[in-house]
Image (cartoon, rainbow, N blue to C red):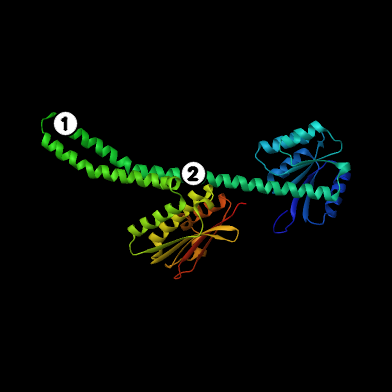
């Protein structure tokens, strides 16, 4: 059933007019659901209507002239249409019932046993399950997008750091070996000494990359210690900014599945604050709030016009979409509060599992 209580668009594919009126009368008796029926009386017309219109559910007569409902279902699914289809048949057949359900039918009902309440429940279940499946497909798509963006970011970091350093080191080593072969050991040693800062930079760049992927601290000492490390690192880079961390729950109270996501949200939020907020004071808290785990990052910076930001690509560049998706993909809720000149608060909450 639609949340906005609008009319469900129902297509009825039935070649017997009397049966159509019986179905229509049953729909009229439903008390919890508003509907807009569209009747078509043939197999081909039904296919054309399905592919050229938007319907919430299809009520399909199993026998349609020389065709049957299984053929219809196969053709619809083969072309990628996900509309929930409820079979209506005059004579029950257990094997056809099983085959229809295995092919993705939402239900299989006998016409002589249908009541308004049975039909209403079947439609409600079909629409609800279809909506849930659509949400799952959307979440899966978002997850793949996040994975690809992470791979893209890592590829760029490797190219810009180690990918540039290693060829330069190879060239210098070849130069040292050539000088050694020519007997100029003193110059060769001087070149070797120049390797030390280059190697040190490579070590730091590599460390930054693997810390960005998944800090070993998360596994070794836990989320709370890692957030404290992140706080200190940010204050080292931006000494003009004061960052406070409040942890009101124990390490073991945070589910393992949330730890890396909380760290990533903190990382993204602090990065935004450093680049854009001009804040002097930042508060980070990880607390229990009623039946939820609540993670909040707030600052006293310049704030932003959320209505404008969320309508543009700036939301993505600021990581706001990524933070929201990370939260929602793990079963939480995400919100942002910001007013120009009055700072920003990012809040992510997850229900505490029993």
Question: In this rendering, would 197 be left or right of 10?
Answer: left
The image shows residue 310 at horizontal and vertical percentages of: 51, 60
Query: What residue is rendered at 61% in x and 45% in y?
Result: 137
The image shows residue 116 at horizontal and vertical percentages of: 85, 50
When the figure is inspected, residue 215 is found, relative to residue 94, above or below; the finding is below
Question: In this rendering, would 179 be left or right of 138?
Answer: left
The residue at which mark 1 appears reads as 178
Which of the 4 image quadrants contains residue 110? top right
The residue at which mark 2 appears reads as 147
Is any atom of residue 46 visible in this view?
Answer: yes
Q: Secondary structure at mark 2?
A: helix
Marking on residue 347: none
Query: What residue is rendered at 48% in x and 43% in y?
Result: 148
When the figure is inspected, residue 222 is found, relative to residue 80, above or below; the finding is below
10 Å neighbourhood of mark 1: few (<14), some, or many (≥20)?
Answer: some
Query: What residue is rendered at 77% in x and 53% in y?
Result: 36
Which of the 4 image quadrants contains residue 66? top right
Which of the 4 image quadrants contains residue 104? top right
Give the Cα distance between marks 2 and 1. Answer: 45 Å
When the figure is inspected, residue 98 is found, relative to residue 340, above or below; the finding is above
Is any atom of residue 55 visible in this view?
Answer: no
Pick the residue in front: 299 or 224: 224
The image shows residue 167 at horizontal and vertical percentages of: 27, 37
Question: In this rendering, would 171 be left or right of 15?
Answer: left
């Amino acid at each position: 059933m639609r949340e906005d209580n609008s009319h469900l668009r129902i297509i009825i594919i039935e070649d017997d007019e009397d049966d159509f009126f019986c179905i229509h009368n049953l729909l009229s008796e439903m008390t919890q659901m508003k509907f807009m029926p569209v009747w078509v009386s043939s197999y081909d017309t039904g296919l054309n209507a399905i592919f050229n219109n938007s319907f919430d559910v299809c009520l399909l007569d199993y026998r349609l002239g020389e065709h049957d409902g299984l053929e219809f279902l196969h053709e619809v699914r083969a072309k990628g249409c996900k509309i929930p289809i409820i079979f209506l048949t005059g004579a029950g057949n257990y094997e056809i019932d099983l085959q229809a359900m295995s092919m993705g039918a939402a239900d299989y009902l006998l016409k002589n046993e249908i009541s308004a309440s049975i039909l209403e429940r079947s439609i409600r279940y079909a629409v609800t399950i279809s909506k849930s499946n659509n949400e799952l497909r959307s979440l899966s798509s978002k997850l793949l997008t996040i994975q690809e963006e992470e791979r893209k970011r890592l590829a760029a970091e490797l190219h810009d750091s180690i990918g540039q350093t290693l060829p330069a080191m190879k060239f210098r080593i070849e130069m040292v070996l050539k000088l050694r072969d020519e007997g100029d050991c003193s110059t060769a040693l001087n070149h070797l000494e120049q390797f030390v800062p280059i190697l040190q930079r490579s070590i730091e760049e590599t460390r930054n990359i693997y810390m960005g992927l998944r800090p070993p601290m998360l596994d070794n000492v836990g989320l709370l210690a890692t957030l404290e490390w992140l706080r200190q690192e940010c204050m080292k880079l931006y000494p003009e900014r004061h960052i406070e961390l409040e942890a009101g729950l124990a390490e073991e109270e945070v589910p393992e599945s949330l730890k890396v996501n909380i760290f990533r949200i903190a990382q993204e939020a602090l990065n935004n604050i450093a680049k854009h907020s001009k804040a002097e004071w930042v508060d980070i808290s990880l607390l229990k709030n009623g039946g939820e785990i609540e993670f909040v990052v707030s600052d006293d910076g310049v704030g932003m016009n959320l209505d404008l930001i969320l309508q543009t690509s700036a939301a993505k560049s600021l990581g706001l979409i990524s933070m929201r998706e990370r939260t929602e993909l793990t079963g939480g809720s995400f919100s942002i509060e910001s007013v120009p000149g009055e700072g920003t608060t990012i809040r992510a909450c997850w229900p505490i599992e029993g």
